Image: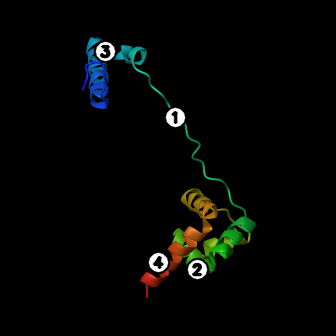
Amino acid sequence: MGKNKKTIGGEIANRLRRFTETFERIEDIADLPKVLTVRTVKLDLRPPTFDAVKIKEIRTQLRVSQPVFAEFLGVSASCVKDWEQGKNVPQGPACRIMDEMQRDITLWRNRILELASLAE
């Protein structure tokens, strides 16, 4: 290979060498942001809220009873009943799971069927 041609390995080695040299010149850790690019990613991880109609719609699309839906979510059947009657609202992980369910109902229906067949 000619001397003027760059290889991927050579380019990686060159960049690592430059990074190491730059890093070794830093005398105080407080100077790190001046030398290196630091990015902060902020995510909105709050799950959406679900009303009685939406909860029943998801469960109906999954084709499961309240007790089966409850067991899958890790809550009591009476809890799901209360959600669907508007007496209470789901919180935290249940909302996160229902959010994922509504994004791909077929995947979750198949997952529940798979688990049901394992229980036989």
- x then y, percent, for residue 40: 49, 30
Give the foreground label among 3 and 4.
Answer: 3
Q: How many marks are shown on the rendered structure?
A: 4
Q: Which residue is mark 3?
A: 22
Residue 17 in view here: yes
- Local SS, label 3: helix
Ranked by sequence position, the earlier of labels 3 and 4 is 3
- Local SS, label 2: helix
Count residues near mark 2 (Cα–Cα under 10 Å), then give few for <14, some for 14-19, many for 20+.
some
Ranked by sequence position, the earlier of labels 2 and 3 is 3
Q: Please determine whether, in this image, residue 109 is positioned above or below residue 24.
A: below
Q: Check whether the beta carbons of the residues at disc 3 and disc 4 lie within 8 A of each other.
A: no
- Local SS, label 1: loop
- x then y, percent, for residue 75: 55, 70
Q: Which residue is mark 2?
A: 67
Q: Please determine whether, in this image, residue 96 is positioned above or below residue 68.
A: above
Left or right of 80 on screen, residue 11: left
Cα gap from disc 2 to disc 4, whole angstroms: 14 Å
Name which residue lies at 62% across and 60% down.
103
Cα gap from disc 1 to disc 3, whole angstroms: 25 Å
